Amino acid sequence: VKLPPLQYVAPRSLAQACDLLAADEDAKVLAGGQSLMPLLAIRLSSPSTLIDLAHVPDLVGVDEAGSYVHIRAMTTHQQVIASPIVREYLPFVAEAGAHIAHAQIRSRGTLGGSIAHGDGAAEWPLTVLTLDAMVEVEGVRGRRTIESDDLFVGPYMTSIAPDEIVTDVWIPKKTEGWSFQEIARRAGDYGLALVGVSTETGPDGTCTSARITVGAAAGTVQRVPAAEDSVVGNVLDERTARRAGETARESLSFISDIHGSNNYRGHLVQTLVTRALIEAGARR
Ligand code: FAD
């Protein structure tokens, strides 16, 4: 791999990293490098400087924080998936993360990097959106929290400003009423369609709230409000699930490429939404 000419800096504090990023609009943060390095190699990105976060303290780890699981941005995919806290309180995260690429990529790629990259086919953006997580960012202008609904604004586009660094992710604990579904051609490939479901149900089985998300198939990772509306207020049974699957298919526009037509992706989403709601309904 031959990279374009660039500077490399390895700040020892978050404040220093923020200063460096704010001082040069062509600089980019380097996390695991598993998306950025390939982009540099094929010249789709040519930053003046790479600001490596590897030596910035306190950016790795998973903690329990009341009703949330707190994951720091530089925690690798593998560390997230293997965390006993994640396995106990966020089985969705452990299951979704296992679908990310291969062991080598999972051992270097990071949660914060994947969120900042904002790939609509990636597992972490869909996870954050399904589980209604909060993402904390810091820059020279201060620290702020971004709600998941405000985070992903288009393909590879997020509401994180170019001078902000993702530092922390806060995910509400969720052990019931969840499902993650993905269809990929081969294990480790990016999915053709990803679906996430997170539901709350009353004592009689009536669904009181639902988050239904779709990734890969429709470009940006997104919620499907029409499908959510069709579920809330109804008993979460197979009939409700099938109707929501049909609604999801009707309400989205799907992409077509060499891996699958828009019609095929629509079919996958319909099937996965149905399957996910049946599974989430059984997990309560
Ligand atoms: P980097 O590559 O270092 O950075 C990516 C972008 O985010 C850059 O623009 C960088 O400036 C920015 N950035 C990084 N960290 C921060 C931060 N803390 N704050 C602000 N900006 C930041 N991913 C999947 O989800 N599913 C897959 O199936 C999958 N398959 C893959 C297959 C291959 C062959 C490869 C090479 C990658 C694959 N990936 C997949 C991508 C992988 O998961 C990356 O690790 C992830 O997308 C980016 O994380 P990173 O830490 O490597 O970020």
Image (cartoon, helix red, strand yellow):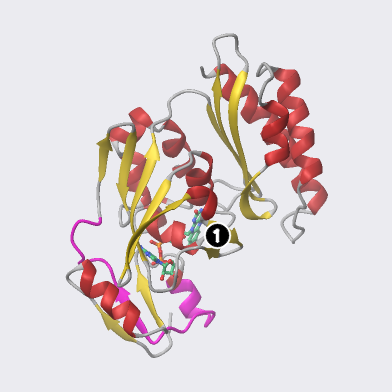
Question: Residue at horizontal 40%, vertical 52%?
Answer: 135
- Which quadrant, please, contains the N terminus? bottom left
Main SS of the magenta part reads loop
The quarter of the picture where residue 214 lies is top right
Question: Callout 1, which amino acid?
Answer: Asp
Mark 1 secondary-structure assignment:
loop
Question: Disc 1 marks which residue?
Answer: 119
Q: Which residues are magenta?
A: 37-59
- Density class for disc 1 (Cα within 10 Å; few <14, some 14-19, many ≥20) is many
Relative side of 130 to 74, left or right: right
* Residue 221, percent from left and from top: 60, 52
Asked whether the viewer can see residue 110, the reply is no
Task: Report the image quarter containing ligand 1.
Answer: bottom left
Question: Residue at horizontal 70%, vertical 32%?
Answer: 229
Extreme-front residue of the structure: 141
- Mark 1 C-beta closer than 8 Å to ligand 1: yes
Relative side of 239 to 115, left or right: right
Between 103 and 281, the one lying in front of the other is: 281
Q: Does residue 49 belong to the magenta stretch?
A: yes
Asked whether the viewer can see residue 218, the reply is yes
Question: Residue at horizontal 27%, vertical 36%?
Answer: 65
Q: Where is 254 relative to 267, above or below?
A: below
Q: Where is 95 relative to 5, above or below?
A: above
Relative side of 74 to 182, left or right: left
